[in-house]
């Protein structure tokens, strides 16, 4: 992903070309869904707190047409051969594995919710990098969901789609994720970030018009090997749940910053205190970021981003050397703020930069990596983009 986001046309053309080549026919339509990045609010989702993702100009496009019966045939440019399945496979979570499980999971979730899903042939192209933490999985689910809903004329308003796509991933694929990814890729608007309350699942579109401000976000794929990320995630989650129980609150979201010192004094070990401090201060940083964006003070969110990073590094302890190097190099090269984004132990860094300085900052990160003999990072400059739609 060293290139800027390809225009939607290029990915869409590949989806159409793939459809024609595989199936020898024209698709009935094309549906796109983007990857996403979380501007701020890390490990707050399962603590019933706040997150602030925005959609990327990188997307997955599905070209699709109906086919007779309850049969689904799906091909991706990233896979060798198409996968075909019927209702029996779709109705049994876990029956299909690998990438096609994300597609079967959407069919399953729709059918489980009582929808008459039309049989279909699908061809998928994407420029969302896989497994980098930019949510290629939610992009795939959301694009397939949009295609099947439109092809079948199903009644499923946008606000009910994230939950359904999440069920596909949690229950069919078997990957435990929160509601953020699917909410972001389905509901985001161009020039806005999506302020999501993970307790109530209410969303608000917050102006984040980087283009008008002459700004951009540089996304850096750390290319760091994921080191025990699943186990570390589970242990952080457990610490948070234990701390909430000790403090007698439903979730850490219920500890206000004003009560933080008193709460920390009631916890008996230092590691748990640091975990709690991260979550409580991170929720507040999301609220502060939203307030600044509402006031049109985009550059001023930089220090909050950087403070979020320090909190993840020192209190939540989820960063790795490649990630810290990228953040430090971006800041030294003039970024207003920079932080790791995503669950940690690898993944991506984002930096808020003057649009005209994005290349200089990207080069500085590449050089800092080279000095430390890290495998070269990927870089892409992005603006907040539109969520899932027919294209
Ligand atoms: P992330 O969502 O951060 O990119 P995940 O591990 O959650 O990482 O999802 C990546 C998986 O999603 C891939 O391994 C693959 O199975 C599936 N996937 C996503 N996009 C595509 C695509 N365009 N074609 C085929 N499979 C895809
Ligand atoms: Mg994912």
Image: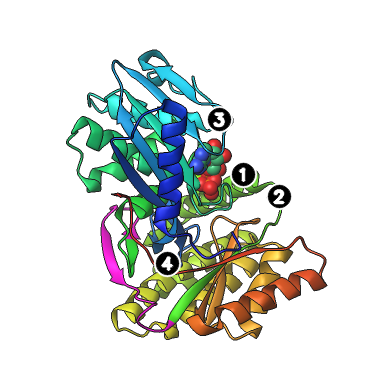
Q: Nearer the viewer, mark 2 or mark 3?
A: 3
Q: Residue at x 73, y 63 (%)?
A: 376
- State the residue position of label 2: 227
Q: Which residue is mark 4?
A: 283
Q: Residues within 10 Å of mark 2 (few under 14, many from 20)?
A: few
Considering the image in quadrants, where does the N terminus appear?
bottom right
Residue 274, compared with residue 31, is above or below; it is below
Question: How many angstroms separate mark 1 from mark 4 (CA)?
Answer: 23 Å
Q: Earlier in the sequence, mark 2 or mark 3?
A: 3
Total numbered circles? 4
Expressed as whole percent of the image width and height from the top left, the position of residue 184 reads 37, 55
- The dominant secondary structure in magenta is loop
Q: Would you name the residue on which mark 3 appears?
A: 98
Separation (CA) of disc 1 from disc 2: 9 Å
Tell whether circle 3 marks a residue whose Cβ is less than 8 angstroms from ligand 1: yes
Q: Position of residue 15 (x, y in %)?
A: 43, 42
Q: Crowdedness of circle 3 by 10 Å Cα count: few (<14), some, many (20+)? A: few
């Amino acid at each position: 992903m060293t290139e800027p986001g390809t225009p939607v046309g290029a990915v869409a053309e590949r989806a159409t070309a793939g459809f024609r080549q595989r199936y020898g026919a024209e698709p009935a339509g094309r549906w796109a869904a983007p990857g996403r990045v979380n501007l701020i609010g890390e490990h707050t989702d399962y603590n019933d707190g706040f997150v602030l993702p925005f959609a990327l100009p990188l997307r997955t496009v599905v070209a699709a047409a109906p086919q007779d019966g309850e049969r689904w045939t799906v091909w991706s440019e990233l896979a060798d051969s198409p996968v075909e399945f019927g209702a029996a496979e779709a109705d049994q979570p876990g029956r299909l594995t690998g990438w096609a499980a994300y597609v079967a999971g959407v069919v399953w979730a729709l059918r489980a919710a009582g929808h008459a899903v039309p049989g279909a042939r699908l061809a998928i192209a994407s420029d969302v990098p896989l497994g980098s933490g930019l949510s290629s999985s939610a992009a795939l689910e959301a694009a397939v969901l949009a295609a099947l809903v439109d092809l079948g004329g199903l009644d499923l308003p946008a606000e009910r789609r994230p939950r359904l796509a999440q069920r596909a991933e949690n229950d069919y694929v078997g990957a435990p994720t929160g509601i953020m990814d699917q909410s972001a890729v389905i509901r985001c608007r161009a020039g806005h970030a999506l302020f999501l309350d993970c307790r109530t699942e209410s969303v608000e579109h917050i102006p984040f018009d980087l283009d008008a401000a002459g700004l951009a976000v540089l996304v850096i794929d750390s290319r760091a090997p994921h080191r025990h990320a699943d186990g570390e995630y589970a242990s952080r989650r457990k610490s948070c749940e234990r701390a909430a129980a000790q403090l007698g609150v439903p979730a850490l979201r219920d500890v206000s910053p004003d009560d933080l010192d008193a709460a920390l004094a009631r916890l008996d070990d230092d590691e748990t205190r640091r975990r709690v401090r991260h979550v409580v201060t991170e929720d507040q940083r999301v609220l502060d970021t939203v307030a600044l964006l509402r006031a049109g003070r985009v550059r001023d969110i930089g220090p909050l981003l950087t403070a979020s990073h320090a909190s993840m590094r020192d209190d939540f302890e989820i960063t790795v050397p490649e990630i810290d190097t990228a953040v430090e190099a971006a800041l030294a090269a003039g970024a207003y703020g920079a932080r790791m984004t995503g669950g940690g132990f690898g993944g991506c860094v984002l930096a808020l930069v003057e649009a005209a300085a994005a290349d200089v900052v990207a080069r500085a990160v590449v050089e800092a990596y080279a000095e430390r003999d890290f495998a070269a990072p990927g870089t892409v400059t992005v603006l907040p983009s539109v969520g899932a739609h027919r294209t």
